[in-house]
Structures are given as C-alpha cells and as structure tokens.
Amino acid sequence: MITMALLLAGWGLLAASQPRQFNRLVHHGRLSSRARTAMRSLGAILLLAPLMILMRAEGPSFGPLVWACLLSISAMAVALMLAWLPGAKSAT
Amino acid sequence: MGPTFRASMNWLHTWSGVVLGSLLFAIFWMGTLSVFDKEIDRWMMPASRLALPPDFSYETMRPAYLAALAAKSPSVLLLVPNQRNPVITALWRGPDGSFAQHLFDPGTGAELPDQGTLGGSRFIYPFHYSLNLKVLGLGYWVVGLCGMMMMVLCVSGVVIHRKIFVDFFTFRPERKIRRATLDLHNVAGVLGLPFHVVISVSGLVILFSLYFPSSIWAVYRQDARLFGREAYGSYVRPPAKRAADLISLDAIVAKAKSVWGQGEPNYLYVFNPGDSASYVQLNRASADVVSNISYVAYVDGTTGELLSASRPEKPAALTQRFIAGLHFIQFEHWTLRWLYFVLGLAGCVLIATGLLFWVESRRDRHRRLGRSGARVVEAVTVASVTGILIATLAFMVTNRALPAGASVLGVERGAIEVSVFHLAWLLTLLHAWASTGRAWIGQCWMISGLASLAVLLNAVTTGDHLIKTIATPQLWSVAGVDATLLIAAFIAIRVALRLARGARPDAASLQGADQR
Amino acid sequence: MTKTLARTALAILGGYLGTSAFIAALAMIAVATVGMERSEAATLGSMLGFLIYLGVIIWSFAEPALVRVALWLGGVTALSLAVVFLLRPVAS
C-alpha cells in the first residue's frame, strides 16, 4: 500500500515535470528548469525508495520482482489517471 | 524491407503483428487465466473445494497409490495437496493407455467423484503453451514462434516509437478512436515493456531443450538422455519383476527432507509401483523461492535408501531454473500472483489495441478501394479478442450447467465443455463477419450475460454464493473467480453502452474488452 | 510478394538453422577450450540461442540486400558445422 502510494507519487511527479503534462495540470505559467530538476530527482527517489522497502520486507529475490511489477502497474495507473483528470485540458 | 532501419522495423512490426496478433492474444489470454488455474479448478470442480487438514500425513496418499497399482500403471504421479490445490491429485496411465487424473480427499484419502472437466489446469493452462494441438507437437512450435515474434515485436516497437519519453504518460481517450487506440497501445507497451519481454523470453527458456536442442546434441551426441541426468540428476531404473510393497510414504518424505532440510515436497512420483525396484522421485516445493526446481531426491521404494539427490548449483542450470520460475509463479505469493494477472491483462490490451489500430488505420481506405483486408482483419480481431472471452465463459457456464456424469451421444462431460468452447469461438467469428461494425457491441453484451450467468449457476448448483464464499476462507478461490466474473460483466456492460452511444468509443472500452 | 516470402522464410527457417548450428559450435568450443561442463555448455548455448535468433530475425528484415542475408546465414551455418565436426573428438 505504502509502496504503491510512493510509486504513484513518484511517477506523478515525473509526469508533471514534462512540459506537456505540466501545461495540462497548471493552466498557466512555465516550469522553471530548476523546479523541473527538483521534481525529477524527487520523483526518481520516490521510485527507488519502494525498492529498499520491498527488499527489506520481501527479501532479495521477491523484493525486486514485486517492485518491477508495481513499477509498471503504477505507471499505467498514472497514465490512466492523467487521462481522466477532472478539469485538466486535453493534451496536445 | 524499407529504405531505413526504422522503416524496415515499422514494416516488420506491422505485418508480424497482424499475422500473429490473434494467436498472440489467445496465448496471452490463456496465460493470464493460468495465473489462477488452480482457483478456476476449484470453481469448476465443486467437490474439490475442501479445507486442507492441519496435520497432513503423506500416508493419506496411499489409497491413491494403491488405485494406480490396481490399474497396473507403470508409474503414478501424486501431487501433494497445498493451499491452492487442497486435494491429492493422482495421475496415472489406465489399462487403455489414456492418461487420467483422479482426485482424493486430503483428510481421509478417499477418492472424490469424477468431476468430469479438464478445468483450468488441464484445458486453459495447456492451451497457453500448446494451443492443445497435439499433432506432432505442432502446438509447442507455433507457440514458440509466437514467443520469438513477441520479442521481435517488442524490439521493433521500441525502434519505431518516435517519442517514447515525451509520450510516456500520454493517453487521450477523448481523441479520435484511431489516436486513442495508438495511445493505449503505446502506454500498455512501453510501461509494461519489462514484463512483456521477460514473460516472452522466460516462456521460451522453460522449453530450451525442445526449441534449441542442437547444443545438447553437439556435446552429448548419441546419448542426449545423459543430459537430464548430468544437468538435473534425474535417475532411472527398470522394474525387477518381483512384487514388493511400498514402504511408508512418510518415511520416504522424511528421507528426502534429510537431504534438503526445510520445505515439503510438491509431488511424489512413484516409478515401478508394486515392484521391488520401485523408486520415488520427490521435488522440493518452490513455495518460498522464485526459482522453479530447487532440490530433487530419488528414494528407494522398498528399502527407503537415498538413490540420487541433486541440488542444482551449476550457474547455467540455476539461471535456467530461475528464469523458468519467473514464468511459472509456483511460489506462494498472492501479491505477485495478482500483479502478474494485471500485467497479463495489460499484455492482452497491448495486442488487442495493436490489431485495432491496424484496422482503424485502413478501414476507410480499404472500403474506398473495395479491398476486403480491413474487414477480414476486423472480423478476426473481434473473434480473437471478445470471441475468446465468450468461448472461455461458455466453457465455464457449460461446466456449471451440465449435471454430473452427463454425456451426449457418447461424448463425455469434459469433452462436451471443450466442444462448447470451440463451437462458441467459431460462432463469434461468424457473428463478427456478419455484423461488421456492430460486432463489438453485441459481443460485449454476450460477455456480460455469460459472466453473470456463470456466477448465478455456480450459486444455484453448488450453493456457494458470493456472500458465503467470502465468509469462508477455504472458498476464497471460488469467491475470487466469482468476483472477477462480476467485475468483467460490469465492465462489459459499460463498454457496450459506451460503444452503442457511438460517439467516442474510448479507452475504457478497449481496455474493458480484455478484462475477462 | 515472392521476395517477402523468401525473406520471411530465410529469417525464420534459415535463421533458426543458422542459430542452431552456431550454438552447437559454441557449446563445443566452450567444452573443448575452457573445459566447461557438458550440461552447462549445452544449457548456456541453448539459452543464448533465443537471443541470437532474435538478433538474426531483426537483422534479416533490416538488411536491404537479400543475397547478403542468404550468404551470411549460409556461411555461418557452414562454418559452425565445420567446427562441430572438427571438435568432435575433443568435446563430447
């Protein structure tokens, strides 16, 4: 549960750091390059943290496997959420 | 096949996708269901919905062994009951040469009535790796080629995708169906890429000695059978033609456990039953490890001595077993099981949207030019996507509708179910051809109807309705199947309604079409 | 159309035969030179076969000159079979 939330947040940040998605989420303004770097690094950390958690909880063989599966599924979930985000402009 | 590398890959991706897409979908669909083959078995074999006794004795398997002995079978495979499969399963060759499965109660050892079905583990699962085509082992080779081509499709797909990172999360259901389909194809493909690649390569690696035997032939020459002995420590000896009783099964298991320590066996394979040269092959259940085979032991059936034991520690063999284990998911891990199921569905979405995109890109042009290509592919696509779902559901509905021991014109119950599957599949193809354009809607309604009917029939014929199954832990496998069927029915209704509105048949539709 | 069929046959069947011959030679070389165990060399060769075959299929469809595909596949097959034949006394 926690790991899934972290992964969703991580992918979410990475997605939001993309100009196309950022424009949809925030209807005005531009993302400064520093903010983008910060979002990307934080997003990457949020994606890696669950690996550590799962390694400890599930062991060295099941941990990475669960993480790899969750990584794909959470990314798909973020893509679907962005598609039906209320109030967001259509992506171009 | 094109002026540039990318153009060649585009051609390769498009055409291998269209030609093999339907088969790939069938393989992925059956593979996804096979993740829960044992749960489907419980659903289709009501007498096997048992609780595992808290203190199981291996001697409980003796009646199963004696039944095989009475049938004069040269060997008998006894599967040890576990949480997912709480029955003693015995497989032996009958006097007429046919291989038959018999189920026994894990508490008393008594034989359970014949359930008259192949169920998940003997119809759906073998369909996944052999299409149930037994002639010349053709099915294995077709599936093997599809597995190879799935990898080719993954590689060529990545090559031709122009904006992988820009489009990483891009999915626009509100756009034209052609664009939305491609978006979904990209999202399912790119984000699920590690799974698609690993699942294809591991599926092939399981059968490495079938698909690429030349390296074995080269180094072993005439005696290729030595390979099994040297690589996995397998052991064979002929019967001595002298009668002898099998010693206590508990003692045999204890002997094997003295080799590998912790962990129960997942099967006892008795060779030469009733003979003084009988021996038992035991394999440690890989419940707690990813790798598929960890330890094998051979115990003498009359003296209880250890004949041969192997713990694979050679790097290549270990790698092979690990990769195979990734595909087999025989470990006890419910989270991973569900994750594989979801990713398998993502694979189905990937293949279905790929086929749809081909049709959508050509439909108008082909109609204008009077060509039938798009129409043919669309009909085949409908039949291979919603069609196989309908066929699977018809298979399950038939299972619950037929009374025990039923037979029609001398055809047994289990064979009737399989015939219904094939007949239903054929009918969906005819329907798809007859009602082009509207076929998706009709078949979605069919899916929701059959899925609901299956849940209803299960409740009526076995009394195990959803409220009861959720409240009883030993019936959770049945609850899981029923719940998934209901979710599928719900999604199919929404898809049908959305498609019927005609406006924007969106992603929910494409995705929903694959949710069983 | 004929050309497409020829290329497909060459990639799928020719590629399979070429890969098979190549991994057979590879396994024998591993046994003869590095002294790898027979079962290990066979398993490793077989598993590498899938990756090599994948590369061969991709390349067969990417290479513009069909003749070159045929020559390469034929050459590798012949050479591999020669190796298998020559190493027979040493590696089995």
Image (tube, coloured by chain):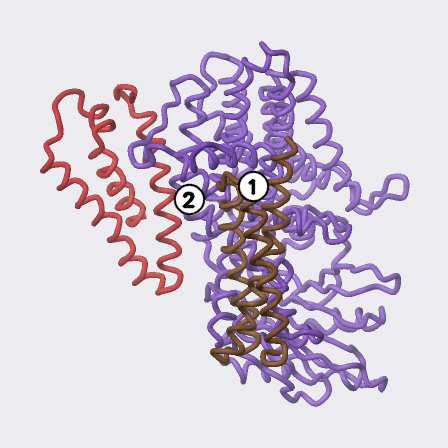
Chain colours: A red, B purple, C brown
* Residue B12 x, y percent position in the rendering: 52, 36
The answer to whether residue B177 is above or below residue C55 is above
**Mark number displayed over residue B193:** 2
Q: Secondary structure at mark 1?
A: helix
The Cα–Cα distance between marks 1 and 2, rounded to whole angstroms, is 31 Å
Residue at the (34%, 25%) spot, across then down: A84
Residue at the (58%, 9%) spot, across then down: B368
Q: Is residue B453 visible?
A: no
Residue type of the residue flagged with mark 1: Leu
- The image shows a total of numbered marks equal to 2
Which chain's residue wears label 2?
Answer: B
Foreground of the two, B127 or C81: C81
* Residue A30 x, y percent position in the rendering: 12, 26
Q: Secondary structure at mark 2?
A: helix
Residue type of the residue flagged with mark 2: Leu
For disc 1, the marked residue is C66
